[in-house]
Image: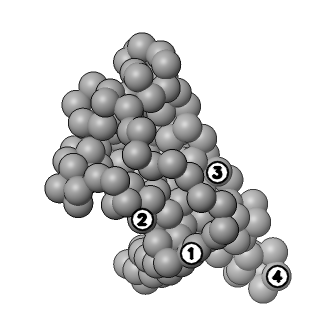
Amino acid sequence: MRKYILIFCLLIYLTGWIFGFLYHYQEEHDYTAIPKTMEESLGTERKEIFQNIFINNAGVVLINFAGLFSFGLISCVNVCYNGFVVGDVIKNGLRVLSSDTILRGILPHSFELVGYFWSALLGIETGLKLFLYVFFQKPFTCSYKKLMFELVLCILIMLTAAFVEAYVSIY
């Protein structure tokens, strides 16, 4: 069942990504004044950037995981929304940056997607089990130790990815 849920998550993410990439809104921005560094962009030090990225990434993991209480619906919406945002950011980045620059800025920390999709998988899978238990009286089989272990691994992946994004990925 996990394989199918993962494929489903990838399809939802890609759908959001495509809509984000193709979505056009009327507001125009000046994309010519791109900051040279992340510090210049955010006006803060790398340590604080790392902390902010980790808090954001951990929040996304926890939202995906908490989706189990909505029978996986919140996880699905969050996956689609994040795909939309990434598609929109890449589209707008391509207005002033080369695809090579964008890839060099994204690829080093792209392994965060493992933790991201894994947490969505946990939220959807456990949510589906909960749904079957609540509405169809199916036995709720879930190893809480395994579930918490996997959640901690997702957060550790996001911690590592936040470090790489703040200190290694170019901007």
Tag 1's secondary structure? loop
- Badge 4: how crowded within 10 Å, few (<14), some, or many (20+)? few
Residue carrying label 4: 135
Q: Are the two marked residues, 1 and 2, in contact with CB atoms closer than 8 angstroms? A: yes
Q: Nearer the viewer, residue 162 or 159?
A: 162
Q: Secondary structure at mark 3?
A: helix
For disc 3, the marked residue is 63
Residue type, label 2? Lys
123 relative to 171 in the view: left or right: right
Q: Is residue 90 visible?
A: no
Q: Nearer the viewer, mark 4 or mark 1?
A: 1
Amino acid type at image mark 3 = Ile
Please tell me how crowded label 2 is: few (under 14), some (14-19), or many (20+) other residues with Cα within 10 Å.
some
- Residue 141: name its quadrant: bottom right
Badge 2 is on which residue? Answer: 91
Mark 2, mark 3: which one is toward the viewer?
A: 2
Say above or below: 39 vs 127: above
Q: Mark 2 or mark 1, which is nearer the start of the sequence? A: 1
The residue lying at 56 percent from left, 52 percent from top is 29
**Quadrant occupied by the N terminus:** bottom left
Residue shown at the point (38%, 32%) measured from the top left: 35
Q: Nearer the viewer, residue 80 or 157?
A: 80
Q: Give the mark nearer the N terminus: 3 vs 1.
A: 1
Circles 2 and 3, Cβ within 8 Å, touching? The answer is no
Distance from disc 4 to disc 1, alpha carbons, whole Å, reads: 38 Å
Mark 1 surroundings: few (<14), some (14-19) or many (≥20) residues within 10 A: few
Question: Distance of mark 4 from mark 2, alpha carbons?
Answer: 42 Å
**Residues marked 4 and 3 touching at CB (< 8 Å):** no
The residue beneath circle 1 is 23
| Among numbered discs 2 and 3, the one appearing first in the sequence | 3
Q: Which residue sits at x=30%, y=37%?
A: 171
